[in-house]
Image (cartoon, rainbow, N blue to C red):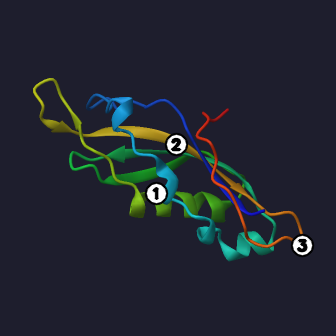
Amino acid sequence: MLALLWMTSPVFAAPYGPAAPSRDRPAPLAWLRQEDYPSASLASRESGEVTAAFDVTETGAVEHCRVVRSSGYLRLDDATCDLIERRARYRPAEDASGKPVATSDVRAFRWVLPPKGLGALGIVGDGTPPN
């Protein structure tokens, strides 16, 4: 079973603004999809958990993704940040006066290989916090 599991961790507040309330954090189910698994990583049987930190702009766009805990495989780490920056969108955080502000977040994603001989069917994780 090929699975790309996503997990979340508490909001990581940036020094330049408050973090968005947890109710405003999007579920990252569409950020990374099973079909995004790098083909070279599949062929090499690479798997692992990637924890990425990134900035969220005043408009809710994501930028400056960086791996803070590597899967151990550069292809998986790079794919994670690339996909997060392209697909993730947030409802902008607001300061006390209601003005949109920049913030940041940290999320963990697990790339899981299917057992040898099985097709590319999979599941999405349950959103448990990273270790």
Mark 1 / mark 2, whichever is N-terminal: 1
Residue under the point 63% across and 35% down: 130
Query: Could you say where residue 113 lies in the image, as x and y percent from the top left?
Result: 77, 61
Query: Could you say where residue 62 lies in the image, as x and y percent from the top left?
Result: 35, 53
* Label 1, label 3: how far apart the Cα atoms are: 30 Å
Residue under the point 26% across and 47% down: 57
Mark 3: which secondary structure? loop
* Label 2, label 3: how far apart the Cα atoms are: 31 Å
Quadrant in the picture for residue 95: top left
Question: Mark 3 highlights which residue?
Answer: 117
* Label 1, label 2: how far apart the Cα atoms are: 10 Å
Question: Mark 1 highlights which residue?
Answer: 84
The image quadrant where one finds the C terminus is: top right
The answer to whether marks 2 and 3 mark residues whose Cβ atoms lie closer than 8 Å is no
Residue under the point 85% across and 70% down: 118
For the residue pair 95 and 30, the one nearer the viewer reads as 30
Judge whether 121 appears above or below 22 on screen. below
For the residue pair 125 and 71, the one nearer the viewer reads as 125
Judge whether 120 appears above or below 30 on screen. below
Disc 1 crowd, CA 10 A, few/some/many (<14, 14-19, 20+): many
Residue type at mark 2 is Arg
In the orientation shown, which residue stands out farthest toward the top?
A: 96
The answer to whether marks 1 and 3 mark residues whose Cβ atoms lie closer than 8 Å is no
Mark 1 / mark 3, whichever is N-terminal: 1
Residue under the point 72% across and 67% down: 121
Residue type at mark 3 is Gly
Quadrant in the picture for residue 25: top left
Judge whether 58 appears above or below 9 on screen. below
Disc 2 crowd, CA 10 A, few/some/many (<14, 14-19, 20+): many
Question: Mark 2 highlights which residue?
Answer: 107
